[in-house]
Amino acid sequence: MKEGSITLSHRERMTAIVLLYGTCLTVLAPSAVGPVLPLIAKAFADVENIQLLSRMVLTMPALFMAITAPLAGILARKFGKIRIFQGAICLYAISAPAGMLASTIEELLVSRAFVGVALGASMPMAIALIGDRFPGRKRIKVMGSQAAVQEFSTVIFSLLAGIVASIGWRGPFGLYFLALPLLLLAFLYLKQPTETDYDQKSDLSNITSERVSLSAVVTAYLIGTAGMISLFLIPIHGPFMVAELLDETSTFRIAAMMSALTIAAGTSAWFYSRLREKLDTEKIFAVCFLLIAIGYYLLSRAGSYEVLIIGSMVSGFGVGFFLPNINLWVVGMGSMAQRGMLVSGLMSCIFIGQFLCPILTTPIVQQHGVPLLFRWTAGLALSISAAFIIASVARERRKTIVEEHT
């Protein structure tokens, strides 16, 4: 892998492949079932509150990911990040495909809960290991690549799910068997490191720090939670927007809309490392939320399927910058020993945001409709963007004043 002067050794390339593959399982969890949510709702139409429960099939893993992630961070300090990662992939390979055997909505939700346990351990370990194994600009490059690979994988998984869904809602659960090759690769190429195996010093002054700022950690966690509540609106409510607009349940068109979102996100994530060299953390967040505000406003005014696609893509560009930016920010807050706990906390907040999204927004949709929900969220995103710009300008002004007095 190369970008300018950034070159990864063979060992680093294989490590990156395994870890990036591992993070793809997180996006496979929702993207495989997203296109069939309306079909699941129809299959269990006689169940009370099925509109909420069918949406929770998508977000149930997030609840258990939020619960599991902090525990994984604690266990990693005793058993090591790699062992936790490998064990989590084993659990995923068993529990994720089990959904196709469910005969009730309760059984389906239970299988999704175990998927959440597996992902709650594997995802933070993969992100923390990227921080451990790749210093400086290599870390920025791999972190951007991680987000891009996740998003592009979502495109493939969503389209495959849309196609396989033609045989019924159970079909897409077969995609989860893709975890089996990763299990083999994880045992072949990931070896337990020592603290001195990798250079933890960054050539970028704000990437690593031996002291952890509590206020910075709390801020990052709050942004992660709020950000994911807003970013998950399209996966949660998008399929129902398409079904209502077209007056039919077209799984392929739903998958195409999800793919438009993820293609845009993957493209922007791929260029994250270049943007990071020009803008600081706050300014990148400002760009993220501005794009999301524009995209969501377009969605709120959509009168055709084409406008839904355009709105999804615009907001997708913001999503692609958000994830590597917040991951890199938190990874750089502590040392190798602290990183597992810090990233696990962030993942827990992100997963809580995903789980809370349908719970907080479905009542709004039922009362006011999906378009108004997106319009309100667009206004909120615009306000957050402005706040980040103000924070960046204020920080630069303080820095200038300090330099003038030294």
Image (cartoon, rainbow, N blue to C red):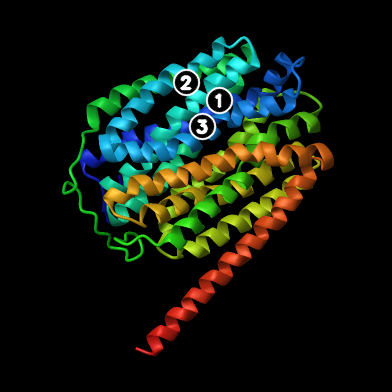
Residue placed under numbered mark 1 in the picture: 32
Up the image or down, 136 lies above or below 146; here it is below
Q: Residue at x 62, y 45 (%)?
A: 229
Residue marked by disc 2: 176
User: Nearer the N terminus, badge 3 or badge 2?
Assistant: 3
Q: Could you tell me residue 128's position as x and y percent?
A: 34, 44
Please name which of the two marks, 3 or 1, marks the residue nearer to the observer. Answer: 3
State whether residue 271 appears in this view: no
Crowd class of label 3 (few under 14; some 14 to 19; many from 20; radius 10 Å) = many
Q: CA distance from mark 1 to mark 2?
A: 8 Å
Q: Quadrant of residue 122?
A: top left
| Residue at which label 3 appears | 64
Q: Earlier in the sequence, mark 1 or mark 2?
A: 1
* Mark 1 touches mark 2? (CB < 8 Å): yes
Q: Amino acid at mark 2?
A: Tyr
Label 1 Cα crowd, 10 Å radius (few <14 / some 14-19 / many 20+): many
Q: CA distance from mark 3 to mark 2?
A: 18 Å
Q: Amino acid at mark 1?
A: Ala
The residue drawn where x is 29% and y is 54% is 335
Q: Is residue 3 above or below residue 259?
A: below
Q: Earlier in the sequence, mark 3 or mark 1?
A: 1
| Mark 3 residue element | helix
Q: Residue furthest bottom?
A: 405
Q: CA distance from mark 3 to mark 1?
A: 18 Å
Measured as percent of width and height from the top left, residue 5 is found at 27, 56
In depth, the one of 140 and 231 nearer the eye is 231
Say which of 351 and 19 sits in front. 351
In contact (CB < 8 Å): disc 3 and disc 2: no
At horizontal 44% and vertical 85% (from top left) the residue drawn is 401
Q: Which mark is residue 98?
A: none
Residue type of the residue flagged with mark 3: Phe
Q: Is residue 161 visible?
A: yes
